[in-house]
Each structure stands twice: as C-alpha cells, then as structure tokens.
Image (cartoon, rainbow, N blue to C red):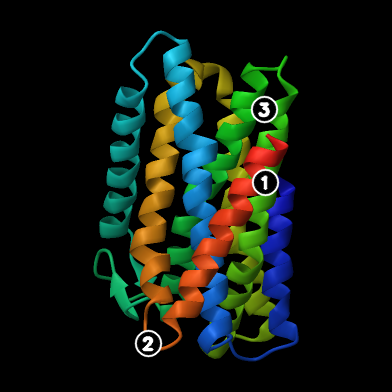
C-alpha cells in the first residue's frame, strides 16, 4: 500500500521542476485518466466481487451491491456538505462556512476524496486474505493497487502545483501534496486490520466503496474534464483509464 502513497509523492515532486499546473489537453487527459481508472475499479474490483461474495453466501447478489452503493454515495455526499473544502471544478468553497485559507480548503478536498481509494485497496487485500487459497485474488488486489497508483501521479502533480500557485513555497507544496495521499495507505491498513470483523459485511463494504468512488468521479473529476475547451481530450483520457484498469484487473486477476 505504500506504493500508492509513493506515486502521490512522486507526482507532488514535479513542483520542483515546474511552476504551474498543466493546462488544456494534458491536464484534462490526466484528470480523465484518473476518472476512467476509478470507474473501472468500482466495477471490476468492487461491485462484481461484492455480487459474487453475496451470492456465495446465499444472498441475492444485487441487494447488498445496490444497498452498499447507495450508502457509499450518501456517505461522501454527507462529507461534501459538512467538511469545508475547495471545489476544483467550480472554483468555489463547499461544505460548512469557514474562514480557512484556500490552501487548506484545497488540501481538505483532495484528502477527502482520497479516502475511498485507500479503503478500496484495503478491501481488495482483505478479500484476498479471506480467500487465501486463491492467488488470483492477490493478483487482482495488486492490479488494483497499480491502477490507483498510476492515477495518483498526475493527481499529486496537479495538487502540489496548484498549492505552489497559491503562494506556497515548493517544499511546502510538495509536503502538502504528499500529505493528501497519506490517508490512502492509512485507511487501507485500517481496513485490512479490521478484515476479520468486517468479513460478514464484505459485500456491503465493497459496494459502499464503489459508491464513494463513483461519487468522487461524477462530482469532482468529470466536471473538470468538460470545463472549457479540449473536452474531447478529457473524454479520451476517461476511456483510456477505464481500458487500462479493466485490462489490469482482468488480465492479472
């Protein structure tokens, strides 16, 4: 799980070489890539395993999948309404009213949206541990980690460069960029440690994580892809990200 944190830090390190976030096509491609990876991960790494786990336990597969998905959406929706943060797509503050600086709000937004990704990776490894006799499960968990790591690099870069643009020195922007990714291994490890306790609710937990990730995609990433010009580049990025994640999970899982 340290890999997903490392890739965030590597992306954040670009602040030492560049001074402004990418504009136009490049930025939209990277954002689209992250969105596509998260969509594919939600389907192949979370919802499909949730349905399979539920059916293996004698339940109707779509019931826990749909219920957990809705709960995940509501959970992120609630956090969006409560926690003060900066909305990248509209450039406005969201959540409860606060006097916090724009830098703090930006870090809060990215940190908030990184939590579901960490939980997702943790759930994937927890599921693999429950099926220790099936090495394909561990391969799928590793593929998911790789996919999340790939999308963390451009995300870390964009965050640190935006922080630098807001007046933070490169070193501080780098450290803050890394900090936004620290929640991923933290929540991933916590999820793995709780694996035994959450085993009976695994179908709901997997689909809940899927709902949370899809909320991030639709609320934050897709709007940024379609703002202004070059939306086609962002759309192609989404398609490429989805394809990459699908291949990783299916081929190595």
Label 3 Cα crowd, 10 Å radius (few <14 / some 14-19 / many 20+): many
Residue drawn at the location 52% of the way across and 62% of the way down: 239
Quadrant for the N terminus in the image: top right
Can you tell which quarter of the image residue 14 is in?
bottom right
Q: Is residue 202 above or below residue 13?
A: above
Q: Name the residue under label 1.
A: 248
Query: Along the horizontal axis of the image, is 83 left or right of 178?
Result: left
User: Are discs 3 and 2 less than 8 Å apart at CB?
Assistant: no
Residue at 55% from the left image edge and 25% from the top image edge: 194
Number of residues whose C-alpha sits closer than 10 Å to that of mark 1, classed few (under 14), some (14–19) or many (20 or more): some
Viewer-nearest of discs 1 and 2: 1
Residue 200 in the image, given as x and y percentages of width and height = 46, 15
In primary-sequence order, the first of circles 3 and 2 is: 3
Q: In which quarter of the image is residue 22?
A: bottom right
User: What percent of the width, then of the height, locates residue 157?
Assistant: 63, 75
Badge 3 or badge 1: first in the primary sequence: 3
Question: Separation of disc 3 and disc 1 at Cα?
Answer: 13 Å
Report how many numbered discs are placed on residues in the image: 3
10 Å neighbourhood of mark 2: few (<14), some, or many (≥20)?
Answer: few
Q: Residue drawn 43% across and 25% down? A: 51
Q: What element carries label 1?
A: helix
Q: Which of 2 and 138 is in front in this view?
A: 138
Q: Is mark 3 on a helix, strand or loop?
A: helix
Residue tagged by mark 2?
A: 228
The reply to whether dot 1 and dot 2 touch (C-beta < 8 Å) is no
- Say left or right for 13 vs 42: right
- Local secondary structure at mark 2: loop
Residue at mark 3: 137
Tell me residue 124's x, y (percent): 59, 33
Q: In which quarter of the image is residue 226?
A: bottom left
- Can residue 88 be seen here? The reply is no
């Amino acid at each position: 799980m340290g890999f997903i944190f490392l890739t965030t830090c590597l992306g954040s390190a670009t602040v030492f070489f560049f001074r402004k976030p990418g504009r136009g096509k490049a930025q939209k491609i990277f954002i689209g890539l992250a969105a596509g990876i998260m969509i594919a991960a939600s389907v192949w790494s979370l919802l499909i395993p949730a349905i399979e786990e539920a059916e293996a336990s004698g339940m109707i597969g779509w019931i826990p999948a749909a219920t957990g998905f809705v709960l995940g959406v509501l959970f992120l929706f609630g956090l969006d309404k409560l926690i003060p943060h900066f909305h990248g797509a509209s450039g406005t503050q969201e959540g409860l009213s606060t006097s916090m600086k724009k830098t703090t709000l930006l870090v809060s937004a990215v940190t908030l949206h990184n939590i579901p990704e960490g939980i997702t990776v943790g759930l994937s490894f927890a599921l693999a541990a429950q099926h220790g006799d099936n090495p394909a499960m561990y391969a799928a968990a590793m593929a998911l980690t790789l996919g999340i790591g790939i999308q963390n690099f451009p995300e870390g870069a964009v965050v640190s460069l935006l922080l630098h643009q807001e007046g933070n020195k490169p070193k501080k922007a780098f450290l803050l960029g890394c900090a936004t990714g620290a929640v991923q291994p933290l929540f991933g490890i916590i999820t793995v440690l709780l694996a035994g306790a959450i085993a009976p609710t695994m179908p709901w937990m997997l689909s809940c994580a899927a709902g949370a990730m899809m909320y991030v995609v639709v609320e934050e990433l897709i709007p940024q892809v379609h703002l202004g010009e070059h939306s086609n580049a962002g759309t192609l990025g989404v398609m490429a990200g989805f394809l990459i994640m699908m291949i990783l999970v299916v081929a190595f899982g």
